[in-house]
């Protein structure tokens, strides 16, 4: 990296001191990131036993949703059938009253 106007006006010992401070800060940040990565891996590993049961539960919910959709179709058909039978019964009542 080229040195801009700062290098000419700043004494070399001060620049070296700032470089040391920045290097230490960078090392601290690396350690923090490393610890966060380790914690993330451990947390992920702790969740692994729950993966299979969660997937099974997800499949069960999908199957239940499919069953509910089928039951809704049957219920709609049954309601239509009931309405049709009620209409037919009303017609028969009218016809019976007309005959009597």
Image (cartoon, helix red, strand yellow):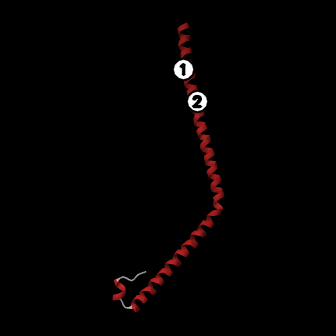
In depth, the one of 42 and 61 nearer the eye is: 42
| Residue reaching furthest to the front | 2
Q: Name the residue under label 2.
A: 77
In depth, the one of 65 and 1 nearer the eye is: 1
Q: Distance of mark 2 from mark 1, alpha carbons?
A: 15 Å
Image position of 46 with respect to 10: above or below: above
The residue that appears at 46% across and 82% down in the rendered structure is 25
Image position of 67 with respect to 4: above or below: above
Return the x and y of residue 75 as percentages of the image width and height.
58, 33
In depth, the one of 54 and 5 nearer the eye is: 5
In front of the other: label 2 or label 1?
2
The residue that appears at 54% across and 20% down in the rendered structure is 87
Specify whether 63 is left or right of 10.
right
Q: Mark 1 points at which residue?
A: 87
| Mark 2 / mark 1, whichever is N-terminal | 2
The residue that appears at 37% across and 91% down in the rendered structure is 11
Specify whether 96 is left or right of 19.
right
Q: Do we see residue 83 in this rendering?
A: yes
Q: Do we see residue 100 in this rendering?
A: no
Quarter placement of the N terminus: bottom left
Image position of 20 with respect to 84: above or below: below
Q: Residue 83 occupies which quadrant of the picture? A: top right
Image position of 92 with respect to 73: above or below: above
Specify whether 52 is left or right of 35.
right
| Residue reaching furthest to the top | 99
Return the x and y of residue 59 as percentages of the image width and height.
63, 49
For disc 2, the neighbor class at 10 Å (few under 14, some 14 to 19, many from 20) is few
What is the secondary structure assignment of the residue under circle 2? Answer: helix
Quarter placement of the C terminus: top right
């Amino acid at each position: 990296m080229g040195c801009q106007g700062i290098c000419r006006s700043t004494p070399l010992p001060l620049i070296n001191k700032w470089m040391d401070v920045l290097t230490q800060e960078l090392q601290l940040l690396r350690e923090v990131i490393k610890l966060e990565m380790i914690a993330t891996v451990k947390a992920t590993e702790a969740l692994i036993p729950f993966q299979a049961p969660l997937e099974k539960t997800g499949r069960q919910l999908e199957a239940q949703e499919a069953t509910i959709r089928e039951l809704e179709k049957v219920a709609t058909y049954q309601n239509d059938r009931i309405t049709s039978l009620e209409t037919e019964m009303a017609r028969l009542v009218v016809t019976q009253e007309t005959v009597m």
